[in-house]
Image: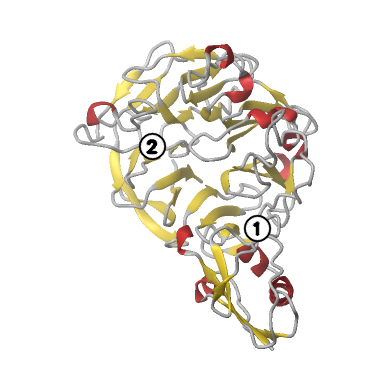
Amino acid sequence: MARLVFTQQLRRFTETPQLDVTVGSLRAALEAAFAINPRLRGYVLDDQGHLRANVVVFIDGRRSAERQRLDDTLSPDSQVYVMQALSGG
Amino acid sequence: MEQRAWVATRKGLFEMQRAGDGWAVARVSFLGEPVSMVLPPSQSSGRMLAALNLGHFGVKLHASDDGGANWHEVATPVYPPQPEQPAPGDRLPGGEYPVIPWKLVQIWSLQHGANGTLWAGTLPGGLFRSGDGGASWQLIESLWLRPERAEWFGGGYDVPGIHSICPHPANEGEVLVGISCGGAWVTRDDGKSWVVQSEGMRADFMPPERAGDPNIQDPHAIVRCSARPEVLWCQHHCGIWRSVDNARSWQRLTAPLSSFGFAVAVHPHDADTAWFVPGVADQQRVPVDGALVVNRTRDGGRSFETLRAGLPQADCFDLVYRHGLAVGGDGRHLMMGSTTGNLWASDDAGTRWAMVQAHLPPIFAVRYG
């Protein structure tokens, strides 16, 4: 199962579940996390459901470039990290 | 006498309490986080709000019902899904789309309204209302979808924003908002319709044929006199204006040293008394000759006194931003904070000042309550 991990920086503000998901896309994985903690959505996505400008997602060490559809395909053993982008600090 | 003040800064919210002859920091909330605006407790419900602007994770809104001792996150105003085709106000004729994403950038103003209503003014120019203490927010689409919005532009930010919200204390459905750069807009039917009311203001940053356009003015801040609500004062990008007919017309005034600045405060009971904190000019946003002063008028702007006692008079580079000057309910107590992180107070209507605190983070807003 793909593993989804959120930056520890987010724990200052809201619960960040670490979860293993069987879904096939990045957005579906994020939605699984938002189902556990709905407030987390607004920390990661903006008003239009796009990745926040200063949040970055790495999938298996590769930075995800698609920031609106979030339709990157996850493999069963993907490691997904949702991180802060230092540009926003 | 005011006993408590709130100072919203780049790195937290500071609660100031009277201590002896002066003031002291009583509590710090959200240490390290940018607090773009604070709304002091409601006199009826006790609810107060703090708006955060987290560098990575967006705008958040927190509420307290016990004077800032405990906070909990409430709903953030959220823009609705942006249509695929431009909505009214989204695009100039022939322009590209989208010009401005429907995405919250910052909560710039918070205000209590009639019957427990809460107002939030935001960048990129949306006004939101909550009828449930901040549990939910609704975008005022009657203003957001005005076609004139396409002419608005940013003033100090990349996008336009609502920094001033002035409910009319006697007319429940009447609210004036100040927009940089979009002028002053008024509703008199509880948000059903809006009219721009910046007639008389002049924008020197525009070509001459557009300088008087009410819809592109840059009022840095607008305040309303509580006792005579038809009197409004405006510190504008290009000077000082006053209206005595409830924003239907504005008259330009000239202050000593400089009429440029951001902050304005009006005496709650005496509509002729107002305070300003001048800077050199828009291209040099520091005190004139390195001396921090407050300009006060007591005659409706016909004359001003330049007040210096207790303020640094050499090598000072402090700027008091648009929400950085507060006046108390009796019109005698003033507090102002600078983007350099210095805080001063006066107990005699600004004649003499005393430093309250140095070395605070950059100060965005000061409010009593």
Tell me if residue A8 comes above or below residue B293 in the rendering: below
Q: Nearer the viewer, mark 2 or mark 1?
A: 1
Measuring from the top left, give residue A25's x and y in whole percent: 72, 75
Mark 2 surroundings within 10 Å by alpha-carbon count, few (fewer than 14), some (14 through 19), many (20 or more): many
Q: Chain of mark 1?
A: A
Nearer the observer, B368 or B132: B132
Q: Is residue B175 visible?
A: no
Q: Amino acid at mark 1?
A: Asp
Mark 1 surroundings within 10 Å by alpha-carbon count, few (fewer than 14), some (14 through 19), many (20 or more): many
Measuring from the top left, give residue A33's x and y in whole percent: 69, 76
Measuring from the top left, give residue B216's x and y in whole percent: 59, 24
Residue at disc 1, secondary structure: loop
The answer for how far apart the CA atoms under marks 2 and 1 are is 31 Å
Q: Residue at x 71, y 39 (%)?
A: B114
Tell me if residue B343 comes above or below residue A67 in the rendering: above
Measuring from the top left, give residue B172's x and y in whole percent: 74, 33
On residue B320, the disc is 2
Q: Residue at x 46, y 20 (%)?
A: B240
Nearer the observer, B206 or B263: B206
Q: Amino acid at mark 2?
A: Val
Q: Chain of mark 2?
A: B
